[in-house]
Image (cartoon, grey):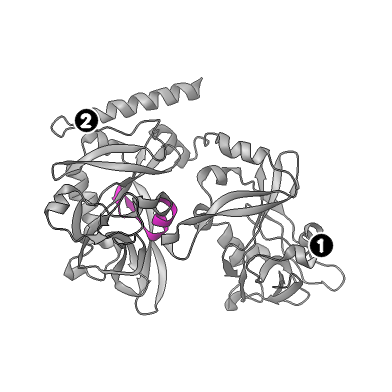
Amino acid sequence: MKRYFALVLAVVMVFALASCGSSGGRKGAGVTANTAVGDSVTMGGYNGEDLTWTAAAKGVGTVLLVSDKVFERKAFNEEPKRAESWKDSSLREWLGGEFFDTAFTDGEKALIATTSVKTSVFDFDSYTTSYEYSDDTVFLLSAEEFAKYVAPLGDFRYGVPTQAMLDGGIYMADVEGSETVKQACGWRLRDDGEQEHYNTMDVYGYDGSVSLYGNDKTNSGGVRPALWAYTDKELAEGWKAGAVGIPANEELDSKLASLSVGSTVEFGTVRFRDPSQGTKAVEWKVLDETDDAWLLYSAGLIGSYNFSDRDHEDEVKWATSPIREYINGDEFMDELFDPWERSKIKLTHVTTCGASEGWTVDPGPETDDHLFLLDREEILKYMPNDEDRLVPEQDSYWLRSPDFTERYFNCVNYLGAINETDAPSNLGLRIAMWVSK
């Protein structure tokens, strides 16, 4: 009864907030408690035109809205700030400042969540990419978000300009192979170009693919932003604070309930190296079950990682390994699973096999993990034959158990045989987890 009352109250608040704007009586409106992925939303206005958005993803009490059209052309950075990344960019300052203040009514502003966004930053000196975080209301998409939310929507990837942009003479390219878009313009993403810190990635107008090299930050580029809007603010903020649980996902629950040992299931997604290709579902094999959970093991590799680095290879165990920290970290798990999937993953008490004939190295302490690698005894139990252990990538992958030599750990090689290699090596990740039925 309390939950029902909270949902009704949230719906009332949404409609009340949407009607109390201060911009000339325009109704702000569009986002409700029932807004679903694929819905069209009218929210805000710019250059005399209403702004329309498409709900591209569902969060907990929120939806991700992506602008349907390119409604402005701006430099990512003015010349004095040319090398600055998204966090310190001129365009971020404009979107979160002047644009946010003038484009939305007060009611609409109250519906826009402040979100922590992750942006890749290119280090020109070392030619490496790192990540930075910023809190934003309105933001440009990242290449990762493009792959996850926009690329699967087909022609939605193309930059269709507003009439004001067309009247201003924005450059248009002929589009090939589209049923609905014949001409489009390019539009910016917020990540640094992967080969040039003075560039940002953008989306080509002619084929809707991501340019990893990108566009110079001082050049004018199409602005097509995104924002997270509340559908249930009480739920969103309560879940974020850990005060309320996530609502049930009936489709996911039904899928998991229908499993059996030996079957496969799609659970989570990974994106291709080229963001333009979108994402693909991760396939898992069901290895075992209990009364309330399934043991899933990824059918293929989910990236690769070093078990340890050179500085810590002598004392590393599964419990202290960078690889364990990495796969159980929020960044890895949030990229792989949506909130409903992640809520199904059980915290598992893990004991790593150690001493047996020929194996005398201490396996280290027991751990509690959401995601883990199988150890030598587990993979022999569930996959006794070499051919059972092969992966589509025909590559080697880690196990978590130590070998009989310090700083060496078990792995499965490309032939499916159990082998060993030194901890600093970079091998494939084949991940296990227990998920609730």
Task: Tell me the CA gap for discs 1 and 2.
Answer: 65 Å
Q: Is residue 95 visible?
A: yes
Specify the quadrant of the image occupied by residue 34.
top left
Among all residues in the image, which is located at the extreme top? 1
Give the amino acid type for the residue marked by disc 2 in the picture.
Lys
Look at the numbered disc 2 and give the secondary structure of its residue: loop
Q: Residues within 10 Å of mark 2 (few under 14, many from 20)?
A: some
The residue positioned 26% from the left and 49% from the top of the image is: 69
**At 47% across and 38% down in the image, what residue appears?**
239
Q: Earlier in the sequence, mark 1 or mark 2?
A: 2
Question: Which amino acid is tagged 1?
Answer: Pro
The foreground one among 174 and 201 is: 174
Q: Position of residue 412 (x, y in %)?
A: 72, 70
Residue 435 placement (x, y as % from top left):
65, 45
Is residue 1 rendered to the left or right of residue 175? right
The residue where tag 1 is placed is 384
Q: In screen coordinates, is 290 left or right of 103?
A: right
Q: Residue 258, which numbered label?
A: none
Which residues are the magenta region? Answer: 135-149
Q: Which residue is mark 2?
A: 27
